[in-house]
Amino acid sequence: MLVNLKEILEIAEKEKIAIGSFNTPNLESIQAVIGAAEELNVPVIIMHAEVHESISPLRVIGKVMLQCAKDAAVPVCVHLDHGEHLEYLEQALELGFTSVMYDGSALPYEENRDNTCAAVRMAKKTGASVEAEIGTLGKREMGYQEEESGSEPAKIYTNPEDAEQFVKETGIDALACSFGTAHGLYLTKPKLDMNVLDEVHRRVDVPLVMHGGSGVSPEDYRTVIEKGIRKINYFTYMSKAGGEGVAKKVAQCQKENTPVYYHDVACWGIEAMKEDVKKALQVFCGK
């Protein structure tokens, strides 16, 4: 069942849960995420990030995402994650994406605001929702990339006053705020600034989004959900689980001297990712 971000976040607000939002750069990850959501009977968001264009072009994987969402037995939002160029957002909207995120968080406030307003105008034409970001998170969305220094990157925390003004001036449907998480594998345990989150939640009247959600403890997940987080982005550890699941099966085949077929590799990856997604969804939705 295909829905937009605003609709799916209304479910989250009503039930006081967070919707799991997963990057799905290939068919296997789409099947894993939607399969897990259907088994648990919970809504879910599947996303394509602009930095994943080299893995799967938007014009190809977007059509697959939309069809799988339409066929799903649970509400599914098809979302463009971290769109850094308005032309790319337009491509997603033309395909039928029901939600887009414009990420101008590294830009000066005025430029981020103006571009976000343009994204909102574009999305309104198709009935899609818009997420945007104030404050930036370290590392790229690609997950497996680490900082050259080997240490956690510096984070720019969201200024609550800026967040309030930004939401009022842009008319967005959801706000991603930075309060201590980072994309990719954590090199040290994340230290979440709950005071920033509390103040942003107090000032802002749209649902809040947590990026860099992989690797956060279940206890911290539950705390941020209680404090108003309604969408949690999750990718790196799901992808890592898929790779580890495949590696384990390949090692078993090598030990038994049996051939490794790619169609089996795909199935192993799906199953391993699905189990990891189910664990995350159970925490996000209180299952």
Image (spheres, grey):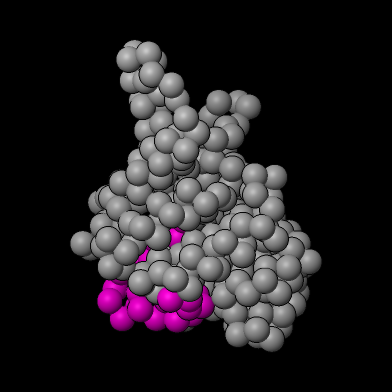
Percent position of residue 11, x then y: 35, 78
Percent position of residue 278, x then y: 30, 53
Nearer-the-camera pick, 255 or 102: 255
- Residue at the image point whose x is 38% and y is 37% from the top: 268
- Tell me: residue 234, above or below residue 75: above
Percent position of residue 277, x then y: 35, 51
**In the image, 127: left or right of 250?**
right
- Residue at the image point whose x is 62% and y is 62% from the top: 62
- Residue at the image point whose x is 43% and y is 21% from the top: 259
Q: From this viewpoint, which residue is outermost toward the left?
A: 287
Nearer-the-camera pick, 171 or 3: 3
- What stretch of residues is rendered in magenta? 1-22
Percent position of residue 158, x then y: 54, 60
Tell how many labels: 0
Query: Quadrant of the image for the N terminus?
Result: bottom left
Nearer-the-camera pick, 261 or 34: 261
Nearer-the-camera pick, 147 or 85: 85
**10 falls in the magenta region:** yes
**In the image, 211: left or right of 121?**
left
Q: Is residue 284 visible?
A: no
Query: Quadrant of the image for the C terminus?
Result: bottom left
**239 falls in the magenta region:** no
- Asked where in the image residue 166 lies, by quadrant, the reply is bottom right
- Tell me: residue 14, above or below residue 143: below
